[in-house]
Amino acid sequence: MTIFGKLAAVVLTVSAMTTPVMAGPAKTIASLDLSKPFATPSPWRFVATQEPPVNDTPSGDMEDGLITLCLSKDDGRTCLPQLDMLLLPPGGDAKSDFVQPHYIGTPTLVHPADGVVLLRLDVSSLYAANGDQLRAMALFGYDRTRDVFVPAYRSVVGHNNNQEIRYVDTGPLRGYVISVEPTQNAPFGYWVTVSQLTGATYRDVLHFRSATRYGDNNQLAVIDAEMPNIQQRLGLWHPGQPLPLPAKGCARPHMAKGALWCS
């Protein structure tokens, strides 16, 4: 698992849902019909609402307001509780200012394999005084036998030290999720974790210490720099074959210090 862990699949029932509580006026910032893409018998929909901007923040700056996430089949009267704490790390404080979402990416539907569809959510916390921020990505699948959405993946990382969670849309790693987080001891690099959808949930299939070192001046994102190592460990690439490259911006691809460099 990653340092912050991943959410295990949990079967939810209507009785296990909670009623959302919103403080102050809020506006709808995202609404996604799920009944058609998932062919659900109930009118499932994802809705995100946001309260007004706030200025009493850890960073001292005006920031976007609190976001309430709701995945519901009864027009928002009850929402799946798993969305309440997407930003909560294992062992974290549920009352912390940093476990509530204030920023959200566009909710999307992803297809890790033919005939498989998942709901992807990306949310972020308030900023800390040092500019750090918690960022989470979660994937939800649909359990047709119970008419309920279930978590398939969740990971939470910081921001200041090149951390990243990446869902891979295309190529030999289509549908995989890769996360990188800094190591806590020398030589300072990154833990690379690769997760693959197996059945209804993701499981870790790789976890290794990167060849990339913190502060090595490689301009590539850590995941891109480690892509040859990732694919080689999975048997998808071998030395002598064309290097697996980022989508753009790699003028002079070559291996150096065990990782991919482009300059």
Image (spheres, rainbow, N blue to C red):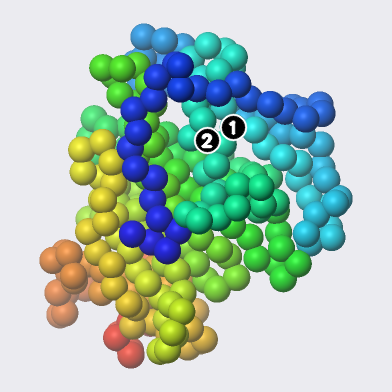
Query: What residue is at 81 percent from the left and 26 percent from the top?
Result: 25
Horizontal side, residue 93 vs residue 209: left or right: right
Residues under labels 1 and 2: Cα distance?
6 Å
How far across and down, in percent of the image, does residue 177 sit?
34, 53
* Mark closest to the chain's N terminus, 1 or 2: 1
How far across and down, in percent of the image, does residue 76 sit?
59, 17
In this rendering, the answer to whether 13 lies above or below 120 is above
Label 1 sits on residue:
69
Nearer to the camera, 15 or 176: 15
* Circle 2: residue type: Leu
* Circle 1: residue type: Leu
| Label number found at residue 145 | none
Q: Secondary structure at mark 2?
A: helix
Quadrant housing the C terminus: bottom left
Label 2 sits on residue:
83
In this rendering, the answer to whether 224 lies above or below 46 is below
Nearer to the camera, 21 or 62: 21
In this rendering, the answer to whether 88 lies above or below 115 is below
User: Badges 1 and 2: C-beta atoms under 8 Å apart?
Assistant: yes
**Number of marks present in the image shown:** 2
How far across and down, in percent of the image, does residue 33 sit?
49, 20
Q: Quadrant of residue 65?
A: top right
Horizontal side, residue 6 vs residue 199: left or right: right
- Crowding at dot 1, Cα within 10 Å, few <14 / some 14-19 / many 20+, comes out as many
Query: What residue is at 16 percent from the left and 79 percent from the top?
Result: 239
Quadrant housing the N terminus: bottom left
Query: What residue is at 64 percent from the left and 44 percent from the top?
Result: 101
Q: Secondary structure at mark 1?
A: strand
Query: What residue is at 40 percent from the left and 40 percent from the top?
Result: 139
